[in-house]
Image (cartoon, rainbow, N blue to C red):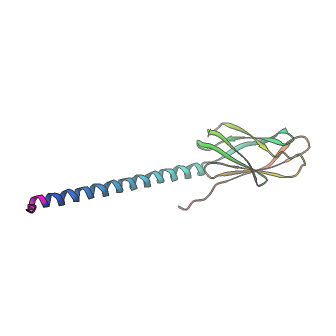
Amino acid sequence: MGFSVSASAAIILISFLVGLGTLYVAWENSYLEVQAAKEFWYSLRSSQLHFDVGNVSVSYVNATHVDVTFTYLGQTLEGKIDVLHNGIYVSSVDVSYLIPGASYTITVPGGDTSGSLNHLTLAFNNGCITIIAYHYNGTAYVVDSVSIQCPLGVS
């Protein structure tokens, strides 16, 4: 005995509905992922546009280390900071979060009392970097310049 026409139509209808349900779930997941990516990009771009560091100073700790103190003036940001001294990676510091208006001190290996120019690079979690040029004048460290650079994205 064969199926009746109504049973065959019901099977085809149910298969069609299951297929539509699967397509809808896949579309919704893709849409939500695109929205999350957009939110992340806008947040990242906003943190780069408003990134700023001020009141930078370098001070003596001992013959092999210096303290770098700065005030963070940007938006709240995760506080992982990679540190390069004269182009060489020396450490990674996690201060949890960088809060606007708060001061932070990082101890950096590589203190140089020869009087030559040194460059300290602080690389932040949003892709921005702060490059600090300093030297030792015989009694204290002097900050010669501070440069802030953030990546430019394609709009």
Percent from the top left, x then y, of residue 59? Answer: 81, 40
96 versus 127 height, above or below: above
Furthest residue toward front: 1
Point 8% across, 61% down: residue: 4
Point 43% across, 53% down: residue: 33
Q: Is residue 5 magenta?
A: yes
Q: Is residue 146 toward the left or the right of residue 44 in the image?
A: right
Q: Is residue 22 toward the left or the right of residue 45 in the image?
A: left
Q: Is residue 103 toward the left or the right of residue 24 in the image?
A: right
- The N terminus - image quarter: bottom left
Point 40% across, 52% down: residue: 32
Give the residues drawn in magenta, as a range: 1-7
Percent from the top left, x then y, of residue 2? Answer: 9, 63
Q: Nearer the viewer, residue 54 or 98?
A: 98
Q: Is residue 153 magenta?
A: no
Q: How many marks?
A: 0
Q: Nearer the viewer, residue 74 or 98?
A: 98
140 versus 19 height, above or below: above
Q: Nearer the viewer, residue 116 or 61?
A: 61
